[in-house]
Image (cartoon, helix red, strand yellow):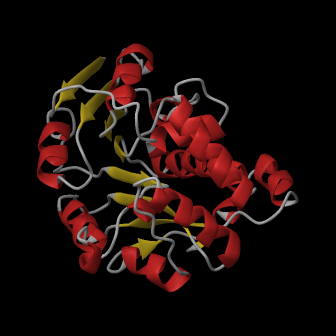
Amino acid sequence: MTSGHEAAPIRIDTTRPHPARVYDWWLGGKDNYPVDEELGRKILAADPAVRRGARANRRFMHRATRAVALAGVRQFLDIGTGIPTEPNLHQVAQGVAPKARVVYADNDPIVLRHAEALLRGTPEGVTDYVHADVRDPDTVLSLAAESLDFGQPVSLSLVALTHYLGDAADGDDVHGLLKRYVEALAPGSHLILSQVTADLNAEAVERAAELFRHSGTPFFPRSIGEFSRFFDGLELLGPGVIPVSGWRPDAEDVTAQAEGIVPVYAGVARKP
C-alpha cells in the first residue's frame, strides 16, 4: 500500500541548488536542474571523492537497513529521503519483511512528486511519504504516525543529512533535534546515521563545504568525536562509528575502498 501527505504547498525552486538534486546528479540521475549540476560539478572539482561518497552512502543505507530488518524491526522512518534511486529503502526493508511499514520524509517538492510516481511497496506492507522538514519534528512525527506505530520499534534513518544541520549556535541545534526524534522512539528502535567529516581529507572537504555555503546551503563537517555524540545513550552496533565503506562491507564496498578514502562516518545504534 502506498500513500502520501503534504505539510506545505508544493513549489519547486529551480533558481537555487538543492542538496537532494545535487546528490541525484552525483549519482547519475536525471532529476536535477542546471543550477544543481553547476554546483555538483564545482564540488566534484574541489573534492573528487564526493561522487564516491554519494554511492558509498547509498550502499551503507542498504546494508544498515537490511541489518536492522534482519534484527526484527518492521517500521522505518527515513528523513531526508532524496530523489528515489533504486533500490530504495522500502525495497530493501520489504525484501526482508514484506509487511514492513516505511515512511519517507523530505522538504524538497520534487522528491515528493517522484515519490508519488516511483515509491511502490509490497501489497502486504506500507510505503508512505510526507512533505516536511527535519527541523519540524512535530510535523514529521505526527504525519509519520498515520502509518507507523511509535509504541513499537522504528528504524530512524538520517543518511547524509546531519552535515546540513548546524549546532545550537548556528540556529539549528542538531543535537536537540535528534534527541527529540529519539525520545519519540520505543525501546528496540534503531538510529542510522552518516555524516561528512574533515578528519580524513580536511582540505578537500573544506573546499566543498565552502561551495555549499556560498550557494546558500549551510554545511557542517564533523569530527569522529562530534559525530559519535549523536549516539549518546544508545547502544552502538558493531563495528561502531567507522568510515562509511567499512561498516559491515560487502564485496562491492571492499572494491570501492581501493579507489580511495571517502570522508564520511557512519554508525547504527539501538535504543535500549
Residue 201, image x, y percentages = 70, 74
The image quarter containing residue 139 is top left
Identify which residue is drawn at 64% across, 40% down. Answer: 26
Between 86 and 53, the residue placed more toward the observer is: 53
Left or right: 59 in relation to 89: right
In this rendering, does residue 92 appear at all? no
- State the residue at coordinates (39%, 66%): 270
Q: Exactly how many numbered labels are in the figure?
A: 0
Q: Quadrant of residue 45?
A: bottom right
Residue located at (51% from left, 71% from top): 221
Q: Residue furthest bottom?
A: 225
Query: Which is nearer the eye, 202 or 175?
Result: 202
- Image location of residue 151, percent across then percent down: 16, 51
Image x and y of residue 185, in percent? 22, 58
Q: Quadrant of the C terminus?
A: bottom left
Say whether residue 230 is visible. yes
- In the image, residue 242 sits, relative to residue 94, either above or below, namely below
* 139, above or below 207, in the image: above
Q: Residue 188 appears at what percent x and percent y?
A: 32, 60
Q: Locate the N terminus and report the quarter of the image it occupies.
A: top left
Q: Splitting the image into 4 quarters, where does residue 182 fall?
A: bottom left
Q: Is residue 38 above or below residue 56?
A: above
